[in-house]
Amino acid sequence: MVHNQLFRQCLAAIPEEQKAEFELSFRIAERISEILKMKNLTQKDFANQLHKRESEISKWMTGRHNFTMQTIAKIEIALGCKLISIAH
């Protein structure tokens, strides 16, 4: 029970903006994973498409990477799919 209380206290101490950023990063990583599965691509294939090391792609897929707009655009072009949808 102490661990759960400590976890809740730590979580409550994280600013809402940071929580939102983490959520977005995880959702982008999940979307990339879905697209790779749909296209039967491995992380190595994806890394080759983007001229990146497989270890960098692996880091992205943990959901802890801070994706820039430039990186998101490159990923969308490489995969031929949208990662983010913006409502009009």
Image (tube, rainbow, N blue to C red):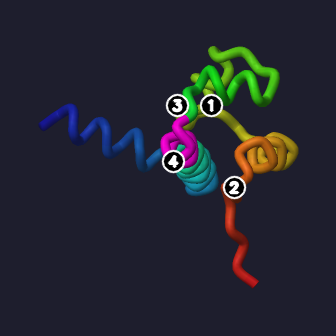
Marks 3,1: beta carbons within 8 A? yes
Image vertical order of residue 71 relative to residue 45, above or below: below
Q: Position of residue 61 (x, y in %)?
A: 56, 32
Asked where in the image residue 25 lies, by quadrant, the reply is: top right
Type of residue at label 2?
Answer: Cys
Residue at 63 percent across and 15 percent down: it is 55
Verify whether residue 36 appears in magenta: yes
Label 2, label 3: how many angstroms apart (C-alpha)? Answer: 20 Å
Furthest-right residue in this view: 70
Q: Earlier in the sequence, mark 1 or mark 2?
A: 1
Characterize the local packing of mark 2: few (<14), some (14-19) or many (20 or more) Cα atoms within 10 angstroms.
few
- Marks 1 and 4, how far apart in space? 18 Å
The residue that mark 3 highlights is: 62
Quadrant of the image for the C terminus?
Answer: bottom right
Q: Quadrant of residue 67?
A: top right
Per the rendered image, the range of residues in magenta is 33-40
Residue labelled with disc 4: 38
Q: Position of residue 46 (x, y in %)?
A: 67, 30
Instruction: Look at 62% across and 31% down and name the residue there.
Output: 60
Amino acid type indicated by mark 4? Met
Which corner quadrant holds the N terminus? top left
